[in-house]
């Protein structure tokens, strides 16, 4: 066995292990559109496989069968029935079914009140997510899409730079995010929980690290979440947190990041007002712990090459720990 083949065989279990993770699997839908897409996939796959098997068997019988089988499967009748009539019938049924599925899931959201819009902007290489609070103010967050279960939500998708593609496989289909244009995608979560999404259009260096989480809240809990997200940042309570906040301001982090309630009001990078409550750092690249904040600040170009955040190797160990504690505490 040559070494390349052996390596491929060794890698196979790893690849298959990735299939057992369900948090980004279109085969485990938690949204109405994703469920329709999943059904469509299986109808097409099983139907296509059944026809393929039938064609192979018929071809084998026409070539290798006994006289009666060869006469039956090699005759002109077979061409007329299975080569012309059957494909026309099958393809017509599939086309009609496809239209029904598209119509069910393809509405542009005009039936959804506009105040349920969540604006999502793809940026190199993260997601700017803007909600509208009940009083009409815009609440900016990042890298997580929070939705209420059982209610259609219209996502207004655009891009700030290059073409990205929004894809939350367990929620619905994918849709391109195009600079200068807004595409609408209506999604409806059918069960509460957290799943994962991914940019589905190659957009340069850190494309593979441009992921996000979808958080579907049980009925009634979404409003409470939005209220807490709309609030200004929590005040630092410990000495470490106070030092962390001071370092954050003095090091100029506020040139790119906003922490509402402080003087940091940069718009270039993700809003960090409640970054400690998110499920990840760096657009689902690292877990959200104080240690990972410290790693990200010092080593972000190694963790997520080419991302727009410069590495900050200017802090002492204690300072870095305080900064990380402060950020992780922004719940
Ligand atoms: Cu954004 Cu790929």
Image (spheres, grey):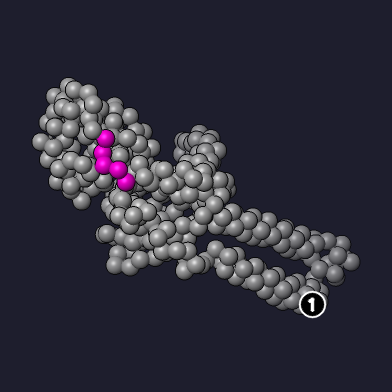
Nearer to me, 109 or 282 = 109
Tell me: residue 266, above or below residue 156. above
Picture quarter containing residue 258? top left
Give the magenta part as a residue range: 230-234
Residue at 46% in and 57% down: 153
* Res. 56 visible in picture: no
In the image, is 134 to the left or to the right of 37?
left
Report the residue that reaches farthest toward the right: 68
In the image, is 125 to the left or to the right of 66?
left
Q: Which residue is mark 1?
A: 76
Tell me: residue 173, above or below residue 297. below
The overriding secondary structure of the stretch rendered in magenta is: loop
Nearer to me, 63 or 224 = 224
In the image, is 70 to the left or to the right of 38?
right
Tell me: residue 92, above or below residue 49. below
Query: Tag 1's secondary structure?
Result: helix
In the image, is 327 to the left or to the right of 118?
left
Picture quarter containing residue 159? bottom left
The picture places residue 121, in percent across and down from the top left corner, at 32, 56
The picture places residue 33, in percent across and down from the top left corner, at 55, 57
Nearer to me, 100 or 8 = 100
Residue at 29% in and 28% down: 290
The picture places residue 47, in percent across and down from the top left corner, at 69, 60
* Res. 40 visible in picture: yes
What is the number of callouts on the image? 1
């Amino acid at each position: 066995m040559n070494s390349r083949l052996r390596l491929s065989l060794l890698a196979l279990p790893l690849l298959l292990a990735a299939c057992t993770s369900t948090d980004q699997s279109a085969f485990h839908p938690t949204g109405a559109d994703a469920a329709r897409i999943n059904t469509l996939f299986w109808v097409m796959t099983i139907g296509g496989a059944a026809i393929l098997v039938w064609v192979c068997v018929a071809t084998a019988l026409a070539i290798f069968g006994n006289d009666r089988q060869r006469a039956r499967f090699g005759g002109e009748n077979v061409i007329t029935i299975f080569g012309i009539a059957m494909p026309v019938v099958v393809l017509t049924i599939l086309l009609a079914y496809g239209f029904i599925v598209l119509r069910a899931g393809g509405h542009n959201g005009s039936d959804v009140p506009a105040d349920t819009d969540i604006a999502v902007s793809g940026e190199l290489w993260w997601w700017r997510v803007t909600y509208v609070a009940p009083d009409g103010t815009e609440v900016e967050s990042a890298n997580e899409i929070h939705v209420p279960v059982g209610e259609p939500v219209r996502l207004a998708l655009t891009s700030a730079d290059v073409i990205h593609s929004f894809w939350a496989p367990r929620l619905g289909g994918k849709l391109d995010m195009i600079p200068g244009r807004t595409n609408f995608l209506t999604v409806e979560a059918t069960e509460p929980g957290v799943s994962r999404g991914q940019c589905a259009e190659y957009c340069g260096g850190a494309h593979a690290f441009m992921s996000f989480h979808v958080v579907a809240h049980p009925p009634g809990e979404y409003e409470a979440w939005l209220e807490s997200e709309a609030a200004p940042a929590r005040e630092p309570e410990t000495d470490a947190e106070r030092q962390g906040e001071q370092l954050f301001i003095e090091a100029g982090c506020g040139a790119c990041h906003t922490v509402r309630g402080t003087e940091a009001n940069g718009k270039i990078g993700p809003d960090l007002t409640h970054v400690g409550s998110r499920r990840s750092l760096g657009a689902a690249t690292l877990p959200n712990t104080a240690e990972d904040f410290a790693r990200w600040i010092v080593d972000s170009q190694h963790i997520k090459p080419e991302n727009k955040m410069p590495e900050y190797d200017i802090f002492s160990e204690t300072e870095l720990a305080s900064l990380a504690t402060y950020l992780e505490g922004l719940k």
